[in-house]
C-alpha cells in the first residue's frame, strides 16, 4: 500500500506524495546544545530516523537536514529569560562556544549509538547569522516587524491564521494571560533579533542593521530550512512540544516572507513519560541520559527497540522493567539472526505485510508483531535471515553488523556442552535437561535452535555477556 502519514497541519493521515517526484526534503529540529540530551529528547530522533528509512524503503531519495541550536534559544520557549548557551556558560565556567562544541559532540555520539542515519546536512545556527539577518530584513520590508527596547519582534496580530498548526485560541490566550507582555504588542509576538544588554557582556553577538545582538530561536529554522530545502519542502519534524510555539512561529515567518507554510507535512513525535502524566525533562530533574543506560549494562540499541514498541504519536512510558524487556527481546533477535545462514530470498508475503504496517503512518508496533510472527514461522532459516534483514532497513537495529561477544569456554563447561549434544542426538531429553540445569547453576545458559546449541555467558546479576 502507498505511504500515508499524519500531518499535524490538517490533523489527518493522508497519502504522501513528494513535491518533486522521487525526492523528499526533510527538516528536523535538532538539539539546543547547552547540556546533554536525555532519552526523552532522543525518542524524537528515533521516530525521525524511522520516517527517513521508511521513505527510502518506498523508493524516495531523502535530503535530510538537522540543525544545531547553539545560540538564540532563551530559557523559555516564549522568548523569556536568557539565552540557554550563556546560562550554560555561567553554570560550567566554560565559554559558550566551548559548551556548544562539547555538547554537540556528545549529541552526535548519542546519535551514532542509536544507529541513526547521518543527516545529509548538519547546520549550526551560528554559521547562518547572515541568512537569519536577511530573512528578518524581508519580514521588516513586508511590515511584520516592530522594535522595542530589547529587540525586534514579529507582529502576529497581522496574521488572521496565526497558530493554526496548534489550533490556538488567541482570544483566550489574551484574556487569560498571566505573564508580563512588556513592550510586546501581543502575548504571541516573538523575538526575531535581541539587542545585547548595555550592562552585560555576551559571548555570542553580532552586528546587524538594527544594532549589535543575536537572533531569536525561531528565525534560525526558517532561514536554514529554506536555504537547504527551499521555501516549500516536503516534511518538517520535531517533538510535540514544538507545535504551539516554535513551529507555529516558523510558519508565521515563512508565510509573511514567502507565502508558504514552509512544509507540506508537519510531523511530531510524542513524549516519553515517567508516570501517567509527566514528561522527561531537564528542568524537572528527571534526566536519564543514554550513558545512564550504558552504566547499567544496557545496549543503547535496546532503547531504540523500546521506542519501536509504541507508535510515535502515542506517549511511551519508560521504566527499567520495560527497558530490560526490550534488551531481552533484542538479544533474542540478534542470536536467532546470527545463527541463520545467508543466501536466502525475502518472503514476499511477510514483506508485504510489514510494508503495509510501516506505510500506515509508521505503525512500528504492528510491524514488530509481523517480524516476530515471521521469526516463529516454519520458513527456511535462510529465508528468515533475508526477510529480517530486509525489515532491518527500517528498524535500524544493526542486525547484520552485530557479532556475539567472543569468550573462552572453560574446559568443564565444554565437556558438559559436548555431552549434552550427544544426549540430544540420542533423544535422551531427560539427560539433556539435567545438563542444562547444571550449566545454568554454573552461570551459563544454553539455548536450542534450528542450528544446534547456543551458549550464553551470564554475569552474577544475570546480564548476558555474550554468546558462542
Image (cartoon, rainbow, N blue to C red):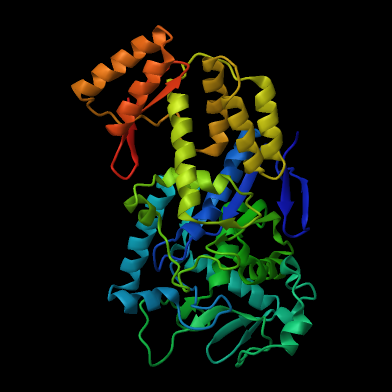
> Residue pushed farthest left?
411
Q: How many marks?
A: 0
Answer above or below: position of 156 versus 131: below
> Residue pushed farthest top?
426
Residue at point 71%, 43% (across, down):
18
Residue 139: where, in percent of width, then height?
Answer: 65, 74
Quarter of the picture containing the N terminus is: top right
Residue 287: where, in percent of width, then height?
Answer: 43, 65
Q: Is residue 244 left or right of residue 2?
A: left
Residue at point 41%, 47% (across, down):
300
Residue nearer the viewer, 165 or 438: 438
Residue at point 27%, 76% (across, down):
93
Residue nearer the viewer, 261 or 279: 279
Answer above or below: position of 190 versus 180: above
Residue at point 46%, 20% (across, down):
449
Tell me if residue 118 can be seen. Answer: no
Answer above or below: position of 322 versus 428: below
Residue 116: where, in percent of width, then height?
Answer: 48, 45
Picture quadrant of residue 226: bottom right
Q: Is residue 9 left or right of residue 28?
A: right
Residue 264: where, in percent of width, then height?
Answer: 72, 53
Q: Is residue 142 left or right of residue 91?
A: right
Residue nearer the viewer, 118 or 256: 118
Quarter of the picture containing the C terminus is: top left
Picture quadrant of residue 2: top right
Tell me if residue 124 can be seen. Answer: yes
Amino acid at each position: 500500500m502507498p505511504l500515508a502519514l499524519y500531518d499535524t497541519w490538517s490533523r489527518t493521515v493522508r497519502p504522501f506524495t513528494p513535491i518533486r517526484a522521487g525526492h523528499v526534503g526533510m527538516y528536523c529540529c535538532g538539539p539546543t546544545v547547552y547540556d546533554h540530551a536525555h532519552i526523552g529528547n532522543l525518542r524524537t530522533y528515533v521516530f525521525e530516523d524511522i520516517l527517513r528509512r521508511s521513505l527510502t524503503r518506498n523508493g524516495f531519495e531523502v535530503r535530510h537536514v538537522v540543525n544545531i541550536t547553539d545560540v538564540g534559544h532563551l530559557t523559555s520557549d516564549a522568548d523569556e529569560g536568557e539565552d540557554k548557551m550563556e546560562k550554560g556558560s555561567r553554570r560550567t565556567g566554560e565559554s559558550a562556544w566551548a559548551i556548544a562544541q562539547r555538547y554537540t559532540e556528545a549529541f552526535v555520539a548519542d546519535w551514532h549509538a542509536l544507529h541513526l542515519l547521518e543527516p545529509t546536512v548538519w547546520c549550526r545556527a551560528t554559521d547562518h547569522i547572515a541568512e537569519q539577518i536577511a530573512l528578518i530584513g524581508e519580514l521588516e520590508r513586508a511590515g511584520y516587524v516592530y522594535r522595542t527596547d530589547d529587540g525586534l519582534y514579529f507582529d502576529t496580530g497581522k496574521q488572521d491564521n496565526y497558530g493554526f498548526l496548534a489550533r490556538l485560541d488567541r482570544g483566550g490566550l489574551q484574556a487569560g494571560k498571566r505573564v508580563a507582555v512588556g513592550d510586546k504588542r501581543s502575548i504571541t509576538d516573538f523575538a526575531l533579533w535581541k539587542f545585547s544588554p548595555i550592562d552585560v557582556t555576551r559571548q555570542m553577538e553580532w552586528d546587524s542593521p538594527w544594532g549589535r545582538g543575536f537572533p531569536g530561536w525561531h528565525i534560525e529554522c526558517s532561514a536554514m530550512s529554506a536555504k537547504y530545502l527551499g521555501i516549500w519542502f516536503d516534511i518538517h519534524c520535531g517533538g510535540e512540544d514544538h507545535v504551539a510555539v516554535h513551529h507555529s512561529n516558523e510558519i508565521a515567518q515563512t508565510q509573511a516572507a514567502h507565502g508558504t507554510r514552509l512544509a507540506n507535512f508537519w510531523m511530531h513525535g510524542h513524549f516519553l513519560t515517567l508516570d501517567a502524566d509527566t514528561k522527561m525533562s531537564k528542568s524537572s530533574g528527571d534526566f536519564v541520559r543514554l550513558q545512564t543506560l550504558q552504566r547499567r549494562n544496557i545496549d543503547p540499541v535496546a532503547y531504540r527497540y523500546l521506542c519501536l514498541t509504541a507508535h510515535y504519536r502515542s506517549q511511551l512510558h519508560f521504566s527499567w522493567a520495560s527497558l530490560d524487556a526490550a534488551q531481552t527481546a533484542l538479544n533474542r533477535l540478534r542470536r536467532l539472526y546470527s545463527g541463520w545462514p545467508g543466501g536466502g530470498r525475502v518472503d514476499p508475503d511477510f514483506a508485504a505485510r510489514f510494508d503495509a504496517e510501516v506505510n500506515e503512518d509508521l505503525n512500528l508496533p504492528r510491524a514488530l508483531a509481523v517480524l516476530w510472527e515471521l521469526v516463529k514461522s516454519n520458513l527456511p532459516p535462510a529465508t528468515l535471515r533475508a526477510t529480517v534483514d530486509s525489515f532491518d532497513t527500517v528498524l535500524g537495529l544493526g542486525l547484520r553488523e552485530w557479532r556475539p561477544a567472543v569468550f573462552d569456554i572453560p574446559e568443564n563447561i565444554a565437556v558438559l556442552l559436548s555431552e549434552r549434544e550427544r544426549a540430544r542426538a540420542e533423544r535422551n531429553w531427560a539427560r539433556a535437561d539435567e545438563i542444562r540445569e547444571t550449566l545454568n547453576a554454573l552461570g551459563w545458559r544454553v539455548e536450542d535452535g534450528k542450528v544446534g546449541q547456543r551458549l550464553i555467558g551470564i554475569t552474577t546479576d544475570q546480564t548476558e555477556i555474550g554468546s558462542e
